[in-house]
Image: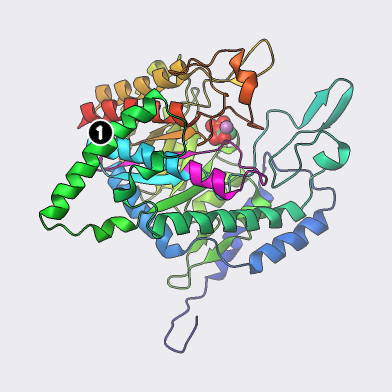
């Protein structure tokens, strides 16, 4: 609300012009909208809708990530590869949040370290694709680019990009975020509820191990309460949102000028990252990201050179501010031990302190003979171990983990203690995009990371 005491700082015209400089640059992975004018109209509408997150929250996250950069906290990012509109139900959102909260408890308790919790949620709707089209039999149609662009239905109508979906995406993000805020601010995420997050999941070994840990936490909390500690602070949990900032017709209109200081903030999420396919130094995405104040991430694949890294830092974090820039490495289990160490040595010469996060998913994709896109849990684990090994050897801090997961009992990744095999994949494979860890595999991974992190401390 505005009143006479509020000082609204206007953006400098050059700041506003800069926010649109990307329009003159090569831009990858955007849909071919059939009617660009209709898309422009929707973008203008989006520009009038309320922000989804607030600049002050974004600033707090930057401070939290600065702590991660300094080795004082750990970042956990998790959620769907591609959120779907149909999947934005209360039950599915709740199970995903519970899974992230459970993983965070395992990490916090196991490694005695604060955990910054972030969902790949409330906006992870747009997908980069390796091909613009998909062919089935003798029919070729535009590729599915995520629910915010077109439909997964393999029909000409379904696959035609529809700008109305940008508005639907905004509203889905708003209702998802509303539920996230309700759960994490309304007492559900209270550490004293640590047992209840485990309810509703089928009993399994990872669950049982979690129960044991939850009992220990319960005892510790009761002891501290008896000793006079006030745990009401635990009722609220900070939970941030992040997604790949891919779709410029969505991200640009949701970029607003912070009335307190005139700087641009992307209000579609607290954190945004640039994908491996759109991080060209002279491309639209890097230019746009260089101008927003949010903490941002960049995915780094196995071919990244120290020179690439230096140029990304110069452009995206020229002031070298801890918390501004997160490098999310996604090398593949077979490559991380060769590809990451030179970057960690290189960073020492660049006077920068990025947050280092491992994404052990995107470098480990395989396709089964039966046609399922999957990942081996063992490869995921191996990449995580390789990440910790490289950081231990370099003396840098392994700051976080970025995973595709769901709270549901899906069968999308091979292995884990349920020993999902190629035949089992078919029983409950629901992802429209990449395979996700299920609830049990997510918890198993959290226990493993907690052990690795415990060794770092
Ligand atoms: C993703 O995170 O869903 C993704 C597409 O990753 P990457 O850019 O690393 O391939
Ligand atoms: Co993915």
Image point (23%, 30%), residue name: 454
Image point (49%, 16%), residue name: 415
Q: Is residue 444 visible?
A: yes
Image point (53%, 50%), residue name: 289
Colour mode of the rendering: rainbow
SS for dot 1: helix
- Tell which of 326 and 18 is nearer to you: 326
Name the residue furthest top: 369
The relative height of residue 311 versus residue 131 in the rendered view (above or below) is: below
Quadrant in the picture for residue 355 = top left
- Left or right: residue 274 compared with residue 111: right
Residue bounds of the magenta highlight: 70-96
Quadrant in the picture for residue 76 = top left
- Tell which of 403 and 134 is nearer to you: 403
Where residue 42 appears, x then y in whole percent?
74, 60
Task: Tell me, yes or no, whether the highlighted magenta stretch contains residue 453.
Answer: no
Q: According to the image, label 1 marks what residue? A: 110
Image point (68%, 28%), residue name: 130
Locate the C terminus and report the quarter of the image it occupies.
top left
- Tell which of 63 and 198 is nearer to you: 198
Quadrant in the picture for residue 124 = top right
The relative height of residue 362 versus residue 147 in the rendered view (above or below) is: above
The relative height of residue 176 versus residue 277 in the rendered view (above or below) is: below
Q: Is residue 321 visible?
A: no
Name the residue furthest bottom: 4
Where residue 440 appears, x then y in whole percent?
44, 28
Ligand 2, seen in the image, is in the quarter at: top right
Where residue 168 appears, x then y in whole percent?
70, 55
Where residue 441 appears, x then y in whole percent?
45, 26
């Amino acid at each position: 609300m505005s009143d006479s005491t509020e000082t609204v700082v206007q953006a400098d015209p050059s700041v506003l012009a800069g926010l649109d400089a990307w329009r003159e640059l090569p831009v990858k992975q955007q849909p071919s909208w059939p009617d660009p004018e209709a898309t422009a109209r929707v973008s203008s509408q989006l520009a009038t809708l309320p922000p989804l997150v607030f600049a002050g929250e974004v600033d707090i996250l930057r401070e939290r990530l600065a702590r991660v950069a300094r080795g004082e906290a750990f970042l956990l990012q998790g959620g769907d590869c591609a959120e779907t509109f149909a999947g934005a139900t209360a039950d599915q959102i709740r199970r995903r949040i519970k899974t992230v909260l459970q993983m965070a408890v395992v990490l916090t308790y196991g490694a005695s370290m604060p955990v910054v919790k972030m969902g790949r949620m409330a906006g992870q709707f747009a997908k980069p694709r390796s091909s613009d089209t998909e062919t089935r039999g003798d029919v070729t149609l535009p590729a599915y680019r995520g629910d915010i662009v077109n439909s997964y239905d393999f029909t000409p109508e379904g696959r035609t990009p529809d700008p109305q979906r940008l508005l639907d995406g905004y509203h889905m993000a708003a209702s998802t975020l509303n539920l996230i805020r309700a759960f994490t601010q309304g007492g559900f995420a209270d550490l004293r509820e640590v047992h209840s997050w485990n309810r509703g999941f089928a009993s399994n070994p990872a669950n049982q191990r979690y129960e044991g840990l939850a009992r220990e936490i319960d005892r510790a909390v009761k002891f501290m309460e008896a000793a006079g500690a006030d745990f009401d602070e635990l009722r609220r949990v900070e939970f941030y949102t992040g997604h790949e900032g891919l779709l410029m017709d969505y991200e640009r209109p949701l970029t607003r000028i912070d009335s307190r200081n005139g700087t641009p903030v992307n209000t579609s999420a607290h954190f945004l990252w640039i994908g491996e396919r759109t991080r060209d130094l002279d491309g639209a995405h890097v230019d746009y990201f260089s101008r927003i104040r949010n903490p941002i991430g960049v995915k780094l694949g196995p071919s990244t050179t120290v020179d690439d890294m230096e140029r990304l830092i110069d452009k995206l974090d020229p002031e070298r501010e801890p918390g501004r820039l997160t490098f999310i490495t996604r090398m593949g289990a077979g490559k991380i031990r060769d590809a990451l160490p030179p970057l960690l040595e290189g960073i020492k010469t660049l006077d920068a302190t990025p947050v280092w996060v491992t994404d052990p998913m995107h470098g480990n994709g395989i396709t089964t003979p039966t046609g399922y896109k999957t990942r081996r849990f063992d490869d995921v684990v191996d990449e995580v171990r390789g990440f910790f090994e490289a950081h231990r050897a370099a003396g840098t801090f392994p700051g976080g983990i970025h995973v595709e997961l769901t709270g549901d009992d899906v069968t999308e990744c091979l292995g884990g203690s349920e020993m999902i095999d190629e035949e089992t994949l078919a029983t409950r494979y629901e992802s429209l995009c990449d395979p996700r860890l299920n609830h049990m595999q997510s918890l198993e991974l959290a226990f493993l990371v907690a052990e690795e992190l415990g060794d770092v401390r």
